[in-house]
Amino acid sequence: MRKSIILLALLLPIFALSIEKTVVGPETLDLDESLDIKLIITTDEPIYIESITDPVPPHFVATEFPASCSQSESMLSCELGLFVTGGTSISYKLTAIGLGYGIIGGPSLVYGEGIKTAEFFRQYFIGKPKAELSISGPNTLLPGEEITATVVIVNTGIRSLGTAILTLSSVNYSDRLELELAPQELRTINYSLGEAPKSGSQTLSAVLSWANSSTSTTHSYLFVHPSLKASRTVRVEWKLENGSVNGYVSVVYELINNGTAAGTVSLSTGEQLELGPGERQSLAKLYTKAAPAVKISIQDANSNQYEVYSFSEESPEMKKGFFTLLYENVSSDIPAIVLVLVGLVSLYFSTKFKQPGLKAGLIVITLVSGLLLYAQISVGALSLPFFQN
């Protein structure tokens, strides 16, 4: 009987002591979200508590714990070293730092008579059902090209999305698709929205909905084409060749792509030019008698033809102009270097003399030298290196 009483006295603190654990927060969290943890110790008798430990799951870190506690890689340890009457508690947080799932376990209590543990199991998932949605496709399209879109959906979470609904909408197009995506699953879906018109724009919208969440994105198409504006200038040009002045028909084509896409400009005489959007180029040709009849058109990369310009044959009168006649009758007999020196010297001395008559005469000489020099330039006869054609 006496032994039973002694044994009962030794066991009494064990039956009077309990430890509980509460976890407040959702079962599924995102990164940086937290759970509130509370460890509750209750006792009917005064008891000496040495320490308490609580496991920290691998995807969490303990935060906001008391100063008497310290954290190792997988455990929160609190050194109490005090007598407890009635009860006490320790509160802290578990903050999610990595994607994954697992079990939250129970704490252990070290007291004067031994160790007390609490059976506690709760599962967790870090990474709410999430999805990334993207649309890819051409940004610009020529008339008649197929309007295509590639939709990519990725479940970036660690749980299934359940039944997700993908909705696509655009001008004269709509589609609805139900699908399920496992964790980390990627789904690629290709769509054809018809043929591109000649001009304008179009936006494709995509919305993915699941549970109480959704994500959306858009992709824009611009419909482009080249457009040609062409003009032709025809004039007579005289050139010095083998000591004589010969006449040519000079033709200059001004070509402008005022469209929104690159194009190839083709002339019926065989020439071709590549013009980007808004680009302008000049094409110069020389003919002996007449500017030929020519058709000019522009095509896109798919050989679709757009504007066509037609120019008829032109035979301008081969009449020598003032500078050509000036060269033949006067300037051809004077070396260009002489004209340059006379002009420069006259100009220099016109600034030195104050007599109006002399100054005016020197200025006239400078102007005449310039006219004669230009006459040589106009027929390509100027022999100075920096003026040669």
Image (cartoon, rainbow, N blue to C red):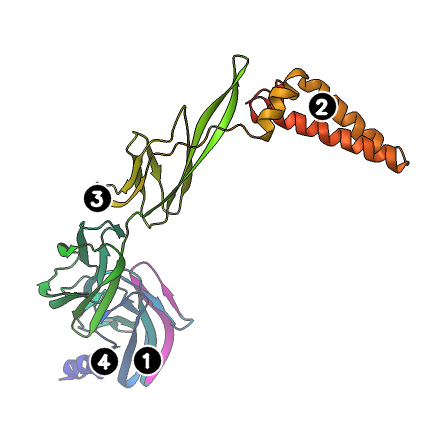
* CA–CA distance in space, label 2 to label 3: 55 Å
Nearest to viewer (mark 4 / mark 3) = 3
> Where's residue 138, x and y in %?
24, 50
Mark 3, residue position: 304
Q: Residue 269 vs residue 351: left or right?
A: left
Nearest to viewer (mark 2 / mark 1) = 2
Mark 4, residue position: 18
Of the numbered discs 4 and 2, the one sitting upstream in the chain is: 4
Segment colored magenta: 69-85
> Where's residue 20, x and y in %?
23, 78
Amino acid under disc 2 = Val
* CA–CA distance in space, label 1 to label 4: 12 Å
User: Which element carries disc 3, helix, strand or loop?
Assistant: loop
Mark 2, residue position: 340
Mark 1, residue position: 89
Q: Is residue 215 magenta?
A: no
* CA–CA distance in space, label 4 to label 3: 86 Å
